[in-house]
Amino acid sequence: MSYFAAAVVKDAKGWSAAKVSLAGAADVEDVADRIRDIEPAADVSLLFVESDDTYLAILRLDNGEDLRIFGSDLAFAEESRLGALLLGDLAEPPADLASGVLDVSAFDAEEPESDDEPDTPPAPASADPTGDADLLADLGLPAARLLELCGQDALLASDITAEVCQAIGCGDEVEELREV
């Protein structure tokens, strides 16, 4: 499987980005160490891993600690060594998706809220997201929006990454990496 891995880090100066090689990584903690090495003093460090433009994994570290992980589809862990490395410890869908109750009003202002039924994201036709879908909420991308993006079969992993990065403010930095 081919992959694209971009680390974006935020510090007092703003966002910066760098490609990351995952070759030879022994486990997810080894990957986390590679993220830390990009900018050890970063407030927020993210790693976007796209595999064959089908699967997306997002890893997050705050101040180099507390690794949080989200995967667009648990099948990634079942179908590749890289997926197993990144998502292998995640076996459950995001809590909000599993419960069937998710507030999507944060990004969908056109839909009026109804007291009769809870808002839920569209059911993905083939995706089985896993991990912490809320890992980017404080950066401007609510869990509901991330799950909605992953549930759109027409979007490639690179499209989702581009949308996510634009929403959180590091879109230009990641696009520059793609052009290199």
Image (spheres, rainbow, N blue to C red):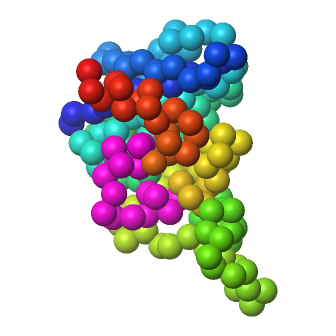
Residue 112: name its quadrant. bottom right
Query: Is residue 86 in view from this perspective?
Result: no
Residue lying at 31% horizontally and 52% vertically, measured from the top left: 156
For residue 98, above or below residue 28: below
Whether the magenta-drawn stretch holds residue 158 is answered as yes
Residue lying at 46% horizontally and 36% vertically, measured from the top left: 171
Q: Nearer the viewer, residue 107 or 2?
A: 107
Residue lying at 58% horizontally and 31% vertically, measured from the top left: 60
Q: Which residues are magenta?
A: 147-162
Residue 105, x across and y down, in percent = 68, 68
Whether the magenta-drawn stretch holds residue 93 is answered as no
Q: Quarter holding the C terminus?
A: top left
Outermost residue on the right side: it is: 115
Q: Nearer the viewer, residue 175 or 68?
A: 175
Residue 49, x across and y down, in percent = 39, 34
Overall secondary structure of the magenta stretch? helix
Q: Nearer the viewer, residue 65 or 53?
A: 53
For residue 141, above or below residue 116: above
Relative side of 47 to 105, left or right: left
Relative side of 26 to 70, left or right: left
Residue 155, x across and y down, in percent = 33, 57
Q: Quarter holding the N terminus?
A: top left
For residue 179, above or below residue 154: above
Residue lying at 62% horizontally and 62% vertically, measured from the top left: 107
Residue 142, x across and y down, in percent = 64, 53
Outermost residue on the bottom side: it is: 116
